[in-house]
Image: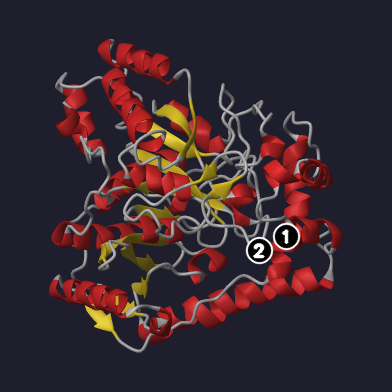
């Protein structure tokens, strides 16, 4: 049974459920066993921060429902791991990896979690993450949190896990779950997927509610699916998208949501697409990474895509005042909705000052700047001009210009693409290979708003032909 479940997909799991070859209880047990042997012992990846003590109980309930003829969704009974900055109103904490919030048993589910529960998925636990989504210290190491310690790379012990959704990416890569949820402000779904040989979708901003997620910046934050295959990400998109009264960013998007994202899993999905190739930051890549991207481009062309050259767009980082000014206000509001001892950013800073050994391995200069240098109000000229400039540079002068001037369907970027999260436009990252040191590398497709169907078509068609993902060389792979 163990061998059959390794690299399991949602489609295969559903078939096994329907044919009584597998139960949700058995699948949850399989992943719990792997968490024990691989994540918490053996290679000790440290990607899982906390296990849901009710996971097996919920799995049993889903099995009973299936046995009585009730199947909530195609993902009924399937286990999922959740990033630790997303509220779950259960026996799991929501701490953003911080000891300061280790007492936060959220009193309400994030809206995305309500959708996940309604679809019958089993919340297996919470994933470790870069503390406060890497908005705590300029010296913070990717994948480190004071509550959970350091997440390790599944393919290369000294490899760079990148971004803040590190635990979500590593857990998926190591077959500790079927899929996971990550969050992104400035690259933390696409980046970890790129570095850990997983597929990640950063949705168009507003397709997925942020209500109940510990925030950084309303202007940029979103959540999205992470999995081993494009098809599993598409299936999870069906569950998590939708309007939410609690998040105005989601209002009015329903007409842009297809009935089923899996309808776009088409093997000929690349045929006729005009795809721009962005080589603007090749000077930041290794020769091996460039070779992997050029090989991927050959596959795209072979599968019928028309590659448009000279569609270069430099990386664009969000102007710091946007994050700095929004963080204090957004975090303080979030803390007012939960029951923690820390009721404000100021309280969190005081906690760290009282617990420097446990909590300040890498310092907290960003938290201090957000508290002391930003007013916490969003009428400051620096904030307003920064936010408007980000929209102009990343959209009108950036992606919109490149798409319009070249009549593009998609833009293909090596690694991850910062202007996707900054613009609010969608992106998908998927594996294209590994270098000589066994470090994974990926390709990001970026699209116009609501282009998720086109992203899924292109990524799926490439994935089916290339089959580039491989198992990590862990001590336990059975």
The reply to whether discs 1 and 2 touch (Cβ–Cβ < 8 Å) is yes
Q: CA distance from mark 1 to mark 2?
A: 7 Å
Does 274 sit above or below residue 227? below
Q: Residues within 10 Å of mark 2 (few under 14, many from 20)?
A: few
Residue nearer the viewer, 54 or 385: 54
Question: Measured from the top left, where is residue 226 in percent x and y?
Answer: 39, 48
Q: Give the residue drawn at x 31%, y 18%.
A: 25
Q: Which mark is residue 138?
A: 2
Residue 167 placement, left or right of 6: right
Does 171 sit above or below residue 187? above
Q: Residues within 10 Å of mark 1 (few under 14, many from 20)?
A: some
Q: Is residue 44 visible?
A: yes
Answer with mark 1 or mark 2, whichever residue precedes in sequence: 2
Question: Measured from the top left, where is residue 131 in percent x and y?
Answer: 61, 48
The C terminus: image quadrant: top left
Provide the residue designation for mark 1. Answer: 366
Q: Label 1, secondary structure: give it.
A: helix
Residue nearer the viewer, 257 or 294: 294
Q: Is residue 375 visible?
A: no
Q: Give the residue drawn at x 59%, y 79%.
A: 393
């Amino acid at each position: 049974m163990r061998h059959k479940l390794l690299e399991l997909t949602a489609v295969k799991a559903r078939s096994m459920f329907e044919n009584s070859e597998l139960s949700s209880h058995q699948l949850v047990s399989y992943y719990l066993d792997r968490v024990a042997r691989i994540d918490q012992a053996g290679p000790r990846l440290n990607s899982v921060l906390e296990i849901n003590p009710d996971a097996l109980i919920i799995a049993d309930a889903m099995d009973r429902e299936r046995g009585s003829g009730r199947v909530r969704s195609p993902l009924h009974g399937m286990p999922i791991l959740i990033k630790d900055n997303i509220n779950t109103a259960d026996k799991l904490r929501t701490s953003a990896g911080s000891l300061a919030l280790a007492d936060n048993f959220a009193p309400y589910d994030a809206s995305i979690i309500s959708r996940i529960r309604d679809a019958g998925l089993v919340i297996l636990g919470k994933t470790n993450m870069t503390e406060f989504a890497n908005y705590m210290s300029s010296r913070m190491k990717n994948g480190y949190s004071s509550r959970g310690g350091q997440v390790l790379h599944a393919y290369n012990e000294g490899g760079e896990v990148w971004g803040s959704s590190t635990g979500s990416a590593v857990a998926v890569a190591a077959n500790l779950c079927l899929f996971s949820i990550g969050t992104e402000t400035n690259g933390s779904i696409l980046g970890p997927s790129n570095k850990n040989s997983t597929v990640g979708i950063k949705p168009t901003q507003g397709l997925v509610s942020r209500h109940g997620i510990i925030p950084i910046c309303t202007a940029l934050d979103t959540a999205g699916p992470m999995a081993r295959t494009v098809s599993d990400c598409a299936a999870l998109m069906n569950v998590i998208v939708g309007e939410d009264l609690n998040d105005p960013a989601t209002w009015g998007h329903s007409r842009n949501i297809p009935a089923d994202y899996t309808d776009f899993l088409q093997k000929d999905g690349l045929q006729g697409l005009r795809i721009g190739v962005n080589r603007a930051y090749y000077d930041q890549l290794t020769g091996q990474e460039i070779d992997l991207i050029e090989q991927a481009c050959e596959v795209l062309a072979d599968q019928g895509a028309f590659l448009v050259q000279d569609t270069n767009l430099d990386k664009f980082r969000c102007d710091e005042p946007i994050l700095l000014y929004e963080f204090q206000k957004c975090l303080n509001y979030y803390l007012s909705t939960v029951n923690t001892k820390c009721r404000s950013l100021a309280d969190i800073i005081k906690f760290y000052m009282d617990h420097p050994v446990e909590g300040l391995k890498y310092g907290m200069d960003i938290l201090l700047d957000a508290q002391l240098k930003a007013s916490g109000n969003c009428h400051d000229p620096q904030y307003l001009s920064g936010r408007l400039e980000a929209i102009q540079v990343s959209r009108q002068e950036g992606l919109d210009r490149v798409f319009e001037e070249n009549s593009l369907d998609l833009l293909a970027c090596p690694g991850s693409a910062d202007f996707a999260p900054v613009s609010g436009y969608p992106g998908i990252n998927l594996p294209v290979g590994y270098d000589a040191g066994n470090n994974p590398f990926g390709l990001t497709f970026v699209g116009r708003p609501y282009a998720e169907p086109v992203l899924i078509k292109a990524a799926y068609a490439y994935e089916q032909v290339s089959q580039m993902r491989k198992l990590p060389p862990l001590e336990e792979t059975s």
